[in-house]
Amino acid sequence: MLILSFVHQFCPLLYLQVNQNQNTWDTHLPEFQFAYNSTPYPATKYTPFSVEHGREARLLAAPDFGVRNVSPGDHYFKTKEFVNRAYDLIKMENMKTQAANALNFNEQRQAPNFVLDNLVLVDCPVYSKVSLGQSKKPSHCYRGPFRIA
């Protein structure tokens, strides 16, 4: 998921850089990657770097005067606790975003208008190959057509 989002947002910036600087575009890839990884994602409210590593990204040139020595065991437990909390919050934010998207979709959706003798397809996800564990490829989960009587 993170990689697809990264590619989707990263490609337009990369195309612009390649068009403007034909010979030196690849020298700026680390800056693009740092900018993407340190920008909070709107749906999760976390940066991709903090979700993956359990802390915010830092520049190498930035001095760390507040660094404390932490034992590896404490660091492991704190990072694990942060990541678990972050994943829980991300799940809640995703559910909230999905609910908002559903409300927005349902406001603009018209109720189906069926008339006698119309042909319809019935959604049967239980009959799809994915539900049987056979294949992850898309398959027809609709049955029909059936005539409305």
Image (cartoon, rainbow, N blue to C red):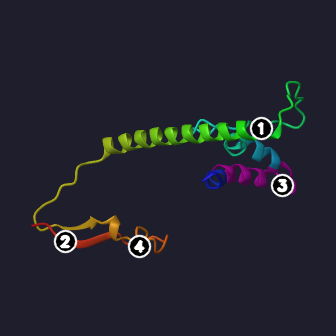
Q: Upstream in the sequence, badge 3 or badge 4?
A: 3
Of labels 1 and 4, the one closer to you: 1
According to the image, label 2 marks what residue?
Answer: 146
Of labels 1 and 2, the one closer to you: 1
Where residue 39 sits, quadrant-wise, is top right
Q: Residue 90: tell me if it is visible.
A: yes
According to the image, label 3 marks what residue?
Answer: 26
Judging from the image, what secondary structure is the residue with disc 1 in? helix
Residues drawn in magenta:
9-29
Callout 3: 10 Å neighbours few (<14), some, many (20+)?
few
Q: Amino acid at mark 3?
A: Asp
Is 10 a magenta residue?
yes
Q: Residue 43: tell me if it is visible.
A: no
Of labels 2 and 3, the one closer to you: 2
Against 78, residue 7 (above or below) is below
Q: Position of residue 67 (x, y in %)?
A: 86, 28
